[in-house]
Amino acid sequence: MLRVDGGMAASDLTMQFLADILAAPVDRPIVMETTALGAAYLAGQAAGVCPDLPGFAASWQCERRFEPQMDAATRERKWAGWRDAVARTLS
């Protein structure tokens, strides 16, 4: 299982493709901008108004889980195409 965040995590299409190509579930949190959340948490912890780190980690909530749907043959074909494209770019 992969947990994602940030702007790109808002794209259902991208998250589904990621789950498919990794053959693993992808979890998207309710709060996708975790960098800002982390900074706010650290400030709150310094001020004594936020819980300890385990308490903060326990507050993570999944908004949506993307399950792999791509068959293995398609996944391998797409992965091989990507590797070929990278190899041609680097040569």
Image (spheres, helix red, strand yellow):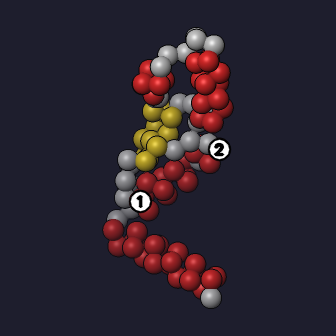
Q: What percent of the width, then of the height, locates residue 22?
A: 41, 59
Q: Is residue 59 visible?
A: no
Q: What percent of the width, then of the height, locates residue 82?
A: 52, 75
Query: In what element is the residue under mark 2?
Result: helix
Q: CA distance from mark 1 to mark 2?
A: 20 Å
**Residue 81 against residue 30 in the figure, above or below:** below
Using the rendered view, name the quadrant where residue 50 is placed.
top right
- Label 2 is placed on what type of residue? Gly
Residue occupying image coordinates x 48% and y 56%: 18
Q: Earlier in the sequence, mark 1 or mark 2?
A: 2
Label 1 sits on residue: 22
- Label 1 is placed on what type of residue? Leu
Q: Which residue occupies the extreme front position in the image?
A: 46
Checking the image for residue 7, the label placed there is 2
Q: What percent of the width, then of the height, locates residue 88?
A: 60, 86
Residue occupying image coordinates x 58% and y 11%: 49
10 Å neighbourhood of mark 1: few (<14), some, or many (≥20)? some
Query: In what element is the residue under mark 1?
Result: helix
Residue occupying image coordinates x 64% and y 29%: 39
Q: What percent of the width, then of the height, locates residue 70?
A: 39, 62
